[in-house]
Amino acid sequence: NLFMPQTAYVTGAVAIHDLFLLEKDICFVNTLFSCVARVSNRHSFVPLWQPPFITRLMPEDRCHLNGIALQNGRLRYAVALGTTNHAAGWRENKASGGCVIDVPTGEIVYQGLSMPHSPRLYENKLWLLNSGHGELGVLDQDRWQPVTELPGFLRGLAMQGGYAFVGLSKAREKATFGDTPITDKKLQCGVQVIRASTGAVEAWLEFQTGIEEIYDVQFIPNCRHAFVLGFQKDDINRVFNFAEQTPSHGL
């Protein structure tokens, strides 16, 4: 399967994280401006929601909002690396400043995580990554329950068929990943497949050269081999996708 771009939206460098559809709108976590937004034909983005502790949308990455969990096509939970309301404030407590926010109410339902990412609702449970500890786990009745610990900074989670597909990064940049529990551990970059019921590693893929960070993991149904054609290589100028010609009865 070849996936190639047909339409592009210019948002500027807003540190886009989780990307998803709300009805037919392309939406994303706008980390730089601490909000959830949708794309627009007229604006860089249209804000949809922001944490209640963010008083003004500024390009300051105030809390490093980065993940959204959807439920029935609506925003349900969000994760951020802090509850701070000033520029890059989340950096002050990377080890335990992370939180989970109930989007409809704005309530902070859990605090004390280390750089959490990728919240996902699966089988009526909220799964997420406690990335600074290298943990995959479940937030159950306001209690964090680790399922397994993996050798990487975790970012990117897809749940399918009783398995969790988790992205691991080496996290070598001390300015971002320093002062977290995994800093001094030997880390890997790749994807691991975890049995959700037991936490056992069922399969893994490790990148030993060329790639050091994974930003997201997605499950593509009915596809064994996928290739994504981007804008940065000349190949995009030589690949064409056009509709079949319809019969004409005189032009």
Image: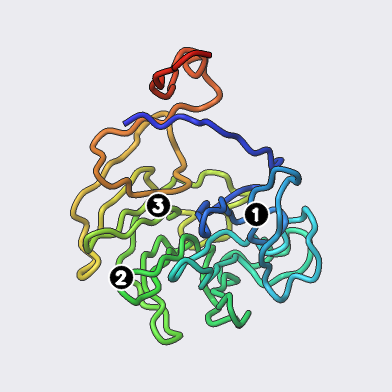
**Marks 3 and 2, how far apart in space?**
15 Å
Q: Report the quarter where the N terminus lies.
A: top left
Q: Is 101 placed above or below 47 here?
A: below
Q: Is 93 placed above or below 141 here?
A: above
Callout 3: SS? loop
Mark 3 in CB contact with mark 1 (< 8 angstroms): no
Residue at 51% over, 69% down: 74
Q: Earlier in the sequence, mark 3 or mark 1?
A: 1
As drawn, is 83 to the left or to the right of 143?
right
Colour mapping used in the image? rainbow
**Residue corresponding to mark 3:** 152
Q: Position of residue 103 (x, y in %)?
A: 58, 75
- The part of the image, by quadrant, that contains residue 105 is bottom right
As drawn, is 30 to the left or to the right of 144?
right
Q: Position of residue 2 (x, y in %)?
A: 36, 29
Relative depth, front residue between 39 and 136:
39
**Residue corresponding to mark 2:** 147
Relative depth, front residue between 107 and 202:
107
**Residue corresponding to mark 1:** 30
Q: Earlier in the sequence, mark 3 or mark 2?
A: 2
Q: Residues within 10 Å of mark 1 (few under 14, many from 20)?
A: many
Q: Nearer the viewer, mark 2 or mark 1?
A: 1
Residue type, numbered disc 2:
Val
Q: Earlier in the sequence, mark 2 or mark 1?
A: 1
Direction bottom: furthest residue? 141
Q: Residues within 10 Å of mark 3 (few under 14, many from 20)?
A: many
Mark 2 in CB contact with mark 1 (< 8 angstroms): no
Q: Is 168 placed above or below 118 here?
A: above
Residue at 28% over, 47% down: 221
Report how many numbered discs are placed on residues in the image: 3
